[in-house]
Amino acid sequence: GDSVTQTEGPVTLSEGTSLTVNCSYETKQYPTLFWYVQYPGEGPQLLFKVPKANEKGSSRGFEATYNKEATSFHLQKASVQESDSAVYYCALSEGQGGSAKLIFGEGTKLTVSS
Amino acid sequence: GPKVLQIPSHQIIDMGQMVTLNCDPVSNHLYFYWYKQILGQQMEFLVNFYNGKVMEKSKLFKDQFSVERPDGSYFTLKIQPTALEDSAVYFCASSLEGAGNTLYFGEGSRLIVV
């Protein structure tokens, strides 16, 4: 089946530094790719998604490009803030119609200190 | 954004007892999901549900698990009987459409089996 692999955490950064969380995926399909963020005590919430290869998604200063050739979808932010501390999940959409579901990576816990 | 409500937020139950986790999905959504997250680990797909039927279930969806959504009310996950390894946070999600669509998650129901 499909799978997603992410940068192992935890990741600790100082405010103002740059972030890269690597995400690689395996699939025989052409999935939509997602980044979700999960804050303590909450469910995952969508950061952004990209449905097509070679397109970029972005939100709140985070961005990622759907690289079909490299099967990657790395998350980047130029300057992180303390409020970015959370767990970040890369995910892909597998299946069609009613059988569709999200397959998540392991998650990367980010802690940003001031 | 759209809200998925889960009840209870947490429950402690004796091994062997039955538990029902309730989910109130986003009102116009048609696709429903349950995910399991053991503390500090990744989100793992359990089951998806559409048009009154289970569409797909993972290996984690044991025979002791069942889901239903009677008459458009709560989407429920029932575990009977519970086992120690069922201790986890269970997240409900819903989406308007299937493949490639955004899943909206609730805040989770933390189940502790003792």
Image: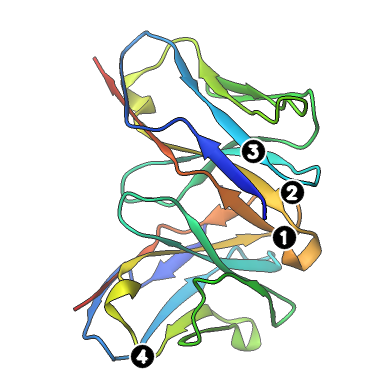
Q: CA distance from mark 3 to mark 2?
A: 15 Å
Question: Are the numbered discs 4 and 2 placed on the same chain, yes or no?
Answer: yes
Type of amino acid at the residue the image marks with label 4:
Pro
Type of amino acid at the residue the image marks with label 3:
Tyr
Task: Give the residue pinned by disc 2.
Answer: B100
Mark 1 Cα shell of 10 Å, populated few (<14), some (14-19), many (≥20): many
Q: Which chain hosts label 3? A: A
Q: Which circle's residue, 4 or 2, is located before the other in the chain?
A: 4
Q: Which residue shows up at 72% across the image and 59% down it?
A: B96
Q: Which residue shows up at 53% across the image and 19% down it?
A: A76
Picture coordinates of residue B44 (x, y %)? 49, 59
Q: CA distance from mark 4 to mark 1?
A: 28 Å
Q: Which circle's residue, 3 or 1, is located before the other in the chain?
A: 3
Q: Which chain hosts label 4? A: B
Q: CA distance from mark 4 to mark 2?
A: 34 Å
Residue A95 vertical placement versus A55 (above, below): below
Residues at circles 4 and 1 in contact by the CB criterion of under 8 Å = no
Residues at circles 2 and 1 in contact by the CB criterion of under 8 Å = yes
Q: Residue A17, located in which quarter of the rendered image?
A: top left
Type of amino acid at the residue the image marks with label 1:
Ala
Residue A89 vertical placement versus B7 (above, below): above
* Residue A62 or residue A74, whichever sits in front: A74
Picture coordinates of residue B8 (x, y %)? 34, 73
Q: SS for tag 2?
A: loop
Check residue A25 in the rendering and tell me which mark sits there, or answer none: 3
Q: SS for tag 1?
A: loop
Task: Give the residue pinned by disc 4.
Answer: B81
Residue lying furthest left in this view?
Answer: B114
Q: CA distance from mark 3 to mark 1?
A: 17 Å
Q: Which chain hosts label 1? A: A
Task: Give the residue pinned by disc 1.
Answer: A100
